[in-house]
Image: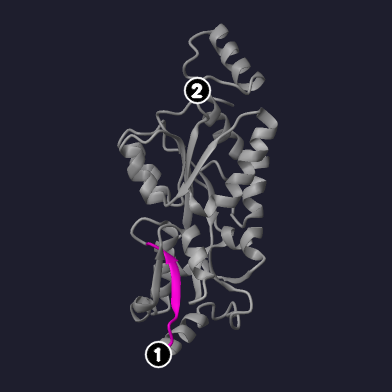
Amino acid sequence: MLSLANANNASGLLLACLLLIGSPAIAGEPPIVAAASDLQFALTEAAEQFKQQTGHTLRLNFGSSGNFRRQIAQGAPFELYLSADERYVQALFEEGYTQDEGVIYAIGRLVWLQRSGRDDLPSEDAPLAAVDDALTAYANGASVRIALANPEHAPYGVAAQQALEHAELWEPTKPLHVLGENVSQAAQFALSDDARGGLVAYSLALAPALSERSEYVLIPETWHSPLRQRMVLTNQAGEVASAFYQWLQQDEGQSILRRYGFATNGAGTDDVSVE
């Protein structure tokens, strides 16, 4: 049910509902949504379906969760923030920039992604075997790279670092790292000519734009901290952003996320578990 905080009486509530549901043209620009780049394809599809149902357009900005967290604290006009790391949302709430603590909308997964036909795809038992291959090639003088998002502000970069540390490959591979500003850019780097591959979001590997020219293997969830993805309405949120926030927690929104590899069981609460 939508939160209509500005409606002070029954007539105001009715008017707000009519404006939201009955007319696609609300005064002002479409609300701006700040979303982690692992949502690039899933959220675009969700926003299109939301528009078909309600007539309302959203402006989607994709990037690193850490950068968006900083920009919101600096006054950026984002109305809805979907982070790939719940800690950024919790920090903004504690600092007074959001309406509440938000909700977990999904759990992300990490994969090893490489270009189709590049080399043998690692097995599930040894998903980072390609990294060992890249180290051997590098030692023999080859120019080879391993792509990942920047761990300083991208949650999937943190997960990639943790996975490499788990396999005792973080320090040895540092000369091979090429860092994306966000995980979407890291996926592009992973499929470039001089890259053996990269550690990126499962949701991107499943997107048709990438799946047609790539292959992947899942990284065990125990190799990195859970990618608990939380969303929240900022203090600038209006009715359309609030409606989309609620829509994403319902069956239609959650089903889209599941198609892109996100775990959503119990989403909308703090009880989402990793399957």
Is 266 situated left or right of 140 in this image?
Answer: right
Residue 267: x %, y % from top left: 57, 45
Name the quadrant containing residue 180.
Answer: bottom left
Which quadrant, please, contains the C terminus? Answer: bottom right
Of the numbered discs in the image, which one, if any, rests on residue 141?
1
- The residue that mark 2 highlights is 28
The answer to whether marks 2 and 1 mark residues whose Cβ atoms lie closer than 8 Å is no
| Residue furthest to the bottom | 140
Q: Nearer the viewer, residue 267 or 78?
A: 78
Instruction: From the top left corner, tell me how far across and down residue 181 is, in percent.
Output: 40, 58
**Image height check: is 197 above or below 7?**
below
Residue shown at 45%/60% (left/top)?
A: 156
Q: Secondary structure at mark 1?
A: loop
Between 97 and 55, the one nearer to me in the picture: 55
Query: Where does the magenta region start and end?
Result: 139-150
In this view of the protein, can residue 271 be seen by the observer?
Answer: yes
Which secondary structure lies at badge 2? loop
Query: In the image, what residue occupies the spot 43% across and 78% down?
Result: 167
Q: Residues within 10 Å of mark 2 (few under 14, many from 20)?
A: few
Vertical placement of 105 versus 191: above or below?
A: above
At horizontal 33% and vertical 44% (from top left) the residue drawn is 70
Q: Quadrant of the N terminus?
A: top right
Dot 1 alpha-carbon crowd within 10 angstroms: few under 14, some 14 to 19, many 20 or more: few
What number of labels is visible? 2
Percent across and percent down for residue 176 are 39, 77
Seen from the viewer's position, the closer of residues 138 and 232 is 138
Q: Report the residue at 50% width, 13% height from top.
A: 7
